[in-house]
Amino acid sequence: MAAAAIGDALSAAGVAHEAVDALYVGNMTSAVLDQQLQMGCLIADYAGLSGIEAVNVEAACASGAAAARMAYQLVAGGAHEVAVVCGIERMTHRDRETVTEALAMAADRELESSRGESFLSLNAKLMQLYLESYSKSAEDFAPFAITAHANAVHNPNAVFHKEIGIGDYLASRTIVDPVRLYDVSPTCNGAAAIVVASADFVKSLGQDQPRIRIAASSAATAPVALQRREDKLDLEAVRKSTHSALEQAGVTHADIDLFEMHDAYTIMSVLCLESAGFTPPGTATDFAREGRIGRSGDLPISTMGGLKARGHPVGATGVYQLVEGYLQLAGLAGASQIPNAETALLQNIGGTGSTVINHILRRDA
């Protein structure tokens, strides 16, 4: 999967294998689920890039964006001219309990996972707290799942190609109260890749193709354990990293044409919108219910299905977001296209908001 994604990315960019200086891989669970380390070196070999610098980057579910941030920093800093980023995860070959345990390693071992907590139970706690704090009902979360499924229909790489309605959402079984089946992203396999190059190298290609610039890259952290956070519904790392990214890019919230958020759970969609500053606390569900998150809304989200319907192969997710952001800004998103999109915010999260990495892409004139 990784070699295929890298080959496709290099071919689309018109870049020869020999021009690549480094490979940065985002992967979370290979050591546990496949008993395999050295993913960077392994993938470089199979992708025809053997001999170059190649490392794996782990930041839980934010591993893909962490790898991209490393590539961005090294290319922007002049250490490399061309770097390839690949996100990869293989999860469906192991039983659900083993996969759940592997993912739970991104929680606080002492305070959470050793006491039986999983990301299902932790997100259920956040969702219950939100319901109680703002007097919301289960159906208030439905628009996020409905929107993601509608957007995934036209994405050939999505896991789900079916639309759902409010009735489907409310009829879906409860996984961990109050989290329902349609509140959760699916476990799946996947790989995605991008090519990050310096402006001078891109000019040397002499190709008439869209140039999408990484206008900002930011990262922030918060306590891993929910109980160590002062306000559990304020994702501090989301707030800080979003502010930093907007400042770096010299743009405001109003300039963002699409927001690829980390919608692993519908509650995370809600908290991301609020903590990132797009809506006041307690109002993201109202924003969604008014139809403002759809492809024709004020702030399109999950434009090609998001984690919820495209799928969440954890180490690959952040790179998928970057690929999809590129496609939108380059006008190559087909039936999923957001008209006249110029600026995209992509947000990848590890844990329940503990590691947050933002990238802003802009279309060059």
Image: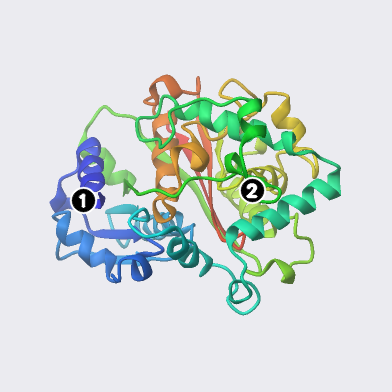
Give the labeled residue for mark 2. Answer: 268
Give the x, y percent position of residue 273.
Answer: 68, 42
Instruction: Please tell me whether residue 294 is drawn above or below residue 310 in the rendered image.
Output: above
* Colouring rule applied to residues: rainbow
3D distance between C-alphas at marks 2 and 1: 31 Å
Give the x, y percent position of residue 123.
Answer: 65, 55
| Lateral position of residue 88 relative to residue 52, left or right | right
Foreground of the two, 7 or 105: 105
Q: Amino acid at mark 2?
A: Met
Q: Amino acid at mark 1?
A: Ala
| Lateral position of residue 263 relative to residue 9, left or right | right
Give the labeled residue for mark 1. Answer: 3
| Lateral position of residue 43 relative to residue 165, left or right | left
Residue drawn at x 27%, y 38% as measured from the top left: 203
Foreground of the two, 100 or 123: 100
Residue drawn at x 42%, y 55% as measured from the top left: 64
Tell me the crowding category of disc 1: few under 14, some 14 to 19, or many 20 or more residues within 10 angstroms, Cα based: many
Give the x, y percent position of residue 144.
Answer: 62, 35
Secondary structure under the numbered disc 1 in the rendered image: helix
Quadrant (top left, top right, bottom left, bottom right) of the C terminus: top left
